[in-house]
């Protein structure tokens, strides 16, 4: 036969009654104890048993509620992870589709794909560096600027990519935001504007910069690689901050403005050529500056804040028939062949 399961409440009541009766009877054996005192004391004992049962019951309910809440939390976490995986899957599909559309023949489709990638980067920051890499890769595609309808339409697409790159970068003043790198090696850029932005590392090796390039009030936390580039238009690098700067072999075919900029690492213009004005007034160079075989074919203002401890001057040529501005410690020297070069000033 099955044993009947007894209710804890029934057992508690029975035990309370037993204590009430037992203690009352026991106290009545004492002649000094009144019947009211005996019943009151027995009632307190029975009530204590009931109170202990109530405490146990509340504790049990609390544990059941905590267990229910833990199960609910785990279910919520599971649903959140599932939803996040779904969002990642959708984002991956959007990314792959947008990248595929960048190869479409229609320029409006390519523009739409660029905006789709930028939207993905804004909504999911984990994609931002990847999207920037894709936009830079698009700008690294071969492009010949010529007066044809196809080139004009492609130029619009490329300007869209340039603008979206700038829009995805944090502002110069936002020091808490993550920094992102740009690799624009051999890219063809027109009216490129990164002014007022903050970047991790900027690479422009062998890049072709046309029209005005606006890099003023820019902050590059890492190095700026701009070797063997061609700068066809006005380069505005004034009031910007960089780590190291590499301009070896770069041809500046229009005015290059570096005024009031700051380089915290080594800088080299080894073999660089300035066809137009080169402006360095108020520029700060930290560790070292190399002007080895640097050529200034027009006016140069080299009034930097201070001559770095390591300054390399070798065949640093300037235009002979122009007046130039030099800082204390440097002077011009005319050579027998008629060239004029910058040298360290001779002691008085």
Image: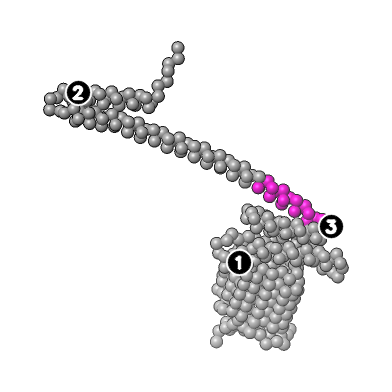
Q: Are marks 3 and 2 in contact (CB under 8 Å)?
A: no
Name the quadrant of the C terminus.
bottom right
Q: Is residue 225 left or right of residue 308?
A: right
The 10 Å Cα crowd at callout 1, few under 14, some 14 to 19, many 20 or more, is some
Name the quadrant of the N terminus.
top left
Q: CA distance from mark 3 to mark 2?
A: 104 Å
Name the residue at 14% across, 24% down: 30
Q: CA distance from mark 2 to mark 1?
A: 87 Å
The tag on residue 171 is: 1
The label nearer to you, 3 versus 2, is: 2
For the residue labelled by badge 3, is the local secondary structure a helix, a strand or a loop? Answer: loop
* Quadrant hosting residue 192: bottom right
Which of the marked residues, 3 or 2, is nearer the chain's N terminus? 2
For the residue labelled by badge 1, is the local secondary structure a helix, a strand or a loop? Answer: loop
Residue 23: x %, y % from top left: 22, 25
Q: Is residue 177 left or right of residue 160?
A: left
Which of the marked residues, 2 or 1, is nearer the chain's N terminus? 2
Which of the marked residues, 1 or 3, is nearer the chain's N terminus? 3
The 10 Å Cα crowd at callout 3, few under 14, some 14 to 19, many 20 or more, is few
Residue occupied by mark 2? 26
* Quadrant hosting residue 295: bottom right
In depth, the one of 173 and 42 nearer the eye is 42
In depth, the one of 92 and 46 nearer the eye is 46
Residue 242: x %, y % from top left: 60, 68
Where are the magenta residues, as a range?
87-106
Q: Is residue 283 magenta?
A: no
The tag on residue 105 is: 3
The label nearer to you, 2 versus 1, is: 2
Residue that protrudes farthest toward the right in the picture: 148
């Amino acid at each position: 036969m099955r044993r009947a399961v007894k209710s804890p409440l029934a057992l508690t009541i029975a035990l309370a009654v037993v204590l009430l009766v037992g203690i009352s009877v026991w106290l009545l054996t004492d002649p000094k104890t009144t019947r009211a005192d005996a019943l009151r004391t027995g009632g307190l004992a029975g009530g204590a048993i009931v109170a202990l049962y109530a405490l146990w019951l509340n504790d049990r309910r609390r544990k059941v509620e905590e267990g229910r809440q833990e199960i609910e939390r785990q279910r919520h976490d599971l649903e959140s992870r599932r939803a996040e995986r779904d969002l990642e899957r959708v984002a991956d599909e959007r990314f792959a589709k947008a990248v595929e559309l960048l190869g479409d023949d229609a320029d409006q489709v390519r523009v739409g794909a660029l905006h789709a990638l930028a939207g993905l980067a804004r909504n999911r920051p984990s994609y931002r560096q990847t999207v920037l890499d894709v936009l830079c890769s698009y700008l690294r595609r071969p492009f010949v600027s010529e007066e044809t309808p196809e080139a004009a339409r492609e130029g619009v697409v490329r300007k869209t990519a340039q603008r979206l790159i700038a829009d995805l970068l944090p502002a110069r003043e936002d020091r808490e935001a993550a920094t992102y790198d740009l690799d624009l090696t051999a890219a063809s850029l027109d009216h490129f504007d990164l002014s007022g932005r903050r970047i991790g590392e900027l690479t422009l090796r062998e890049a072709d910069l046309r029209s005005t390039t606006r890099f003023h009030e820019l902050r590059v936390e890492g190095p700026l690689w701009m070797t063997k580039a061609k700068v066809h238009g006005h380069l505005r690098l004034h009031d910007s901050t960089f780590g190291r700067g590499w301009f070896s072999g770069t041809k500046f075919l229009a005015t290059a403005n570096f005024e009031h900029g700051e380089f915290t690492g080594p800088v080299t213009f080894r073999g660089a050529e300035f066809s137009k004005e080169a402006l360095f007034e108020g520029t700060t160079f930290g560790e070292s500056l190399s002007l080895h075989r640097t050529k200034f074919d027009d006016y140069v203002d080299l009034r930097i804040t201070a001559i770095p401890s390591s300054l390399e001057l070798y065949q640093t040529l300037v235009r002979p028939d122009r007046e130039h501005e030099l800082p204390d410690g440097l002077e011009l020297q005319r050579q027998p062949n008629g060239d004029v070069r910058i040298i360290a000033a001779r002691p008085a």
